[in-house]
Image: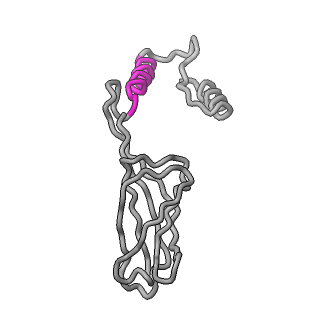
Amino acid sequence: MNIKNLLLCTLISSFSLVGCIAEPLDGDGADDGAIDDAEVVGEGAEAIIGPGGDDGGGTVTKTVNLSCSITYPSIFNVNAAIKNTSLFAVPDSAKITFTVTHYYGSPGPYTSSFTGPLAKGQTKLVPLSYSGALDAYGCTAKATWTILD
């Protein structure tokens, strides 16, 4: 391989943000084996299509973080307000998991889940009725679902 070809390839790829394989110019005296190797690498890269390959059938798990806060509509009524602030609508097959933290560390973090749907921007109030729920002060939530390819 000629150093001029490599430098030219590097310069061009930095401007266009694409990669390239430097091939020798006529008269560089490169052997045919180097060209064959470059072609084999190119063919192998084209063979990778996606999770399911050419036939499809793969699955992808999608997880998005949701906003979660503790609300007290009345003094003894505690809710976890879970809002979909993600870029995606959560489908009805999604599992929405939330974890509540408490003052004084007692009880330990409380984790529960329910299924969707939850549209973009929509808020769902989940009543907290377990022992120690009145000491809740924060929570985190996420939604997970599987997409068939």
Q: Residue at x 41, y 80 (%)?
A: 133
Q: Is residue 128 above or below residue 1?
A: below
Residue at the right extreme, as displayed: 15
User: Above or below — where is 6 with respect to 133?
Assistant: above
Q: Which residues are magenta?
A: 33-50
| Residue at figure coordinates x 52%, y 79% from the top left | 74
Quadrant of the image occupied by residue 11: top right
Q: Position of residue 69 (x, y in %)?
A: 52, 70
Give the total of numbered labels.
0
Tell me what residue is drawn at x 32 percent, y 25 percent: 55
- Look at 53% across and 25% down and name the residue there: 21
Residue 1 position within the rendered picture, expressed as x and y whole percent measured from the top left: 53, 24
Task: Say which of 27 and 88 sits in front.
Answer: 88
Above or below, 107 against 29 in this view is: below
What is the residue that sits farthest to the front in this orientation? 74
Quarter in which the C terminus is drawn = top left
**Quick check: 2 left or right of 103?**
right
Secondary structure mostly seen in magenta is helix
Query: In the displayed structure, does residue 127 sit left or right of residue 57?
Result: right
Q: Position of residue 125 (x, y in %)?
A: 47, 65
Is 9 or 90 nearer to us in this picture? 90
Give yes or no for residue 37 being in the magenta stretch.
yes
Residue 140 position, x and y percent, is 46, 67
Q: Is residue 25 left or right of residue 127?
A: right
Whether 12 is drawn above or below 85: the answer is above
**Colouring scheme applied when the structure was drawn:** one colour
In the image, farthest residue toward the top: 26
Q: Nearer the viewer, residue 122 or 65?
A: 122
